Amino acid sequence: MKSLRGIIVMLFVASCTLVNAQDIHFSQYDLSPLTLNPALTGAYEGTFRVGGIYRDQWSSILTNQYVTPAVFIDAPIIRGFGKNDWFGAGVIVSNDRAGSAALKNLTALASISYHLGLGKKANTVLSLGGQGGFVQKQIDQNELLFEDEIITGTTSQEFSLPAFESSVSYLDFNVGGLLNSYLSSRFNFYVGASAFHVSNPDDAFLTDGKLKSRILGHAGFNYDLSSRLVLSPTFLFQTQAKAREIVGQAKLGYHINPERNVTLYSGLGYRLQDAAILMIGMDYKGFRAGIAYDVNASSLDTATRGRGAYELALSYTAKIYKTPVVKPVLFCPRF
């Protein structure tokens, strides 16, 4: 039994670098731009943007569920080489915790991007971005629990665990590109691609193992159906090693007060062979909030009873501009 435990531990630790779940992903990926594509850094109109997203998976059926919080801040910092170009910079920090072995993934990345306005009116913008930073993964050996310990009621681990590091650290780098085009005042579309772990860092706890690159593509558009309604479908595809993820979503927004930028959103999505996604949200001036819930629709639904993950997202885009001073003009009529 002791040797069997050791084999199980070895398989578990070695597999920690192979499972795609260790790369974080969100259902509301559009509300976490810096984890979606580095080219989205500073890709907006405003002074700065700050936000966060929190994902909790299977908390209703597990005591050690999967939890992923992330926070970010970014800004268009300086003008670029052309009159319609600019640089963006930002920081993203996430801390993923997965399962009963308390596997943690702390990531801190700095982002930089360049946005190139194309055409006379710069209605199309080409963006290129990169990220680089520090990653630390940890595992708690004391949290490992085996079948015979549950049966006998003891938690003592009087056997020799295979020697492995409980913490690994490495540098990580990501790149991305985005094309965003406004074809009219009512319609814009965008398409982007990004690559994560481009340096294939060694992140194994037990043996040498290179982290496979994750390739992601995303696209979408916004179309004003009327002065009050806007339709926003999106599509995401990503692949890492032998794992694939395909997500399609559509949101419908209703402008309660277009002048004050008050908009309510509701939407549906589907992650292929995994889950249906329910979404609601609101824009209020510079604030954007979103709530999503995943309804499990895969072969795991027997164990999960259809329960999946919920997400909470909130961001704020500040627009701090100098108010123009208008001097009154006094007309002095002559008689």
Image (spheres, rainbow, N blue to C red):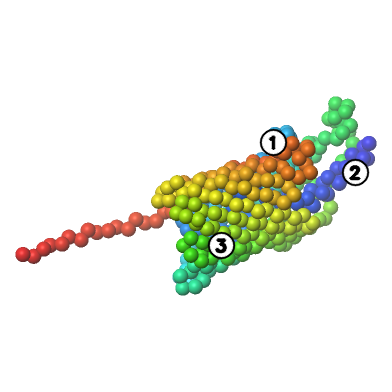
Would you call the spot at circle 2 few (<14 residues within 10 Å), some (14-19), or many (20 or more)? Answer: few
Q: Amino acid at mark 3?
A: Phe
Q: Amino acid at mark 1?
A: Ser
Residue position marked by numbered label 2 in the rendering: 7
Vertical comparison of 124 with 274: above or below: below
Q: Residue furthest top?
A: 153
| Label placed on residue 189 | 3
- The x, y position of residue 261, in whole percent, is 44, 50
Is residue 14 shown left or right of residue 274? right
Q: Quick one: SS at disc 1? A: loop
- The residue depicted at 59 percent of the width and 55 percent of the height is 233
Q: Quick one: SS at disc 2? A: helix
Q: Amino acid at mark 2?
A: Ile
- The residue depicted at 46 percent of the width and 51 percent of the height is 228
Quadrant location, the C terminus: bottom left
> Closer to the N terminus: mark 1 or mark 2?
2
Q: Is residue 115 visible?
A: no
> Closer to the N terminus: mark 3 or mark 1?
1
Specify the quadrant of the image occupied by residue 278.
Answer: top right
- The x, y position of residue 324, in whole percent, is 32, 58
Spatial CA distance of label 3 from label 1 is 36 Å
Vertical comparison of 72 with 125: above or below: above
Is residue 8 shown left or right of residue 309? right
| Label placed on residue 112 | none
Residue position marked by numbered label 1 in the rendering: 59
Spatial CA distance of label 1 from label 2 is 29 Å
- The x, y position of residue 192, in whole percent, is 62, 62
The reply to whether the C-beta atoms of the residues labelled 1 and 2 are less than 8 Å apart is no
Q: Residue furthest left?
A: 335
> Closer to the N terminus: mark 3 or mark 2?
2
- Eye-nearest disc, 3 or 1: 3
- The x, y position of residue 246, in whole percent, is 70, 55
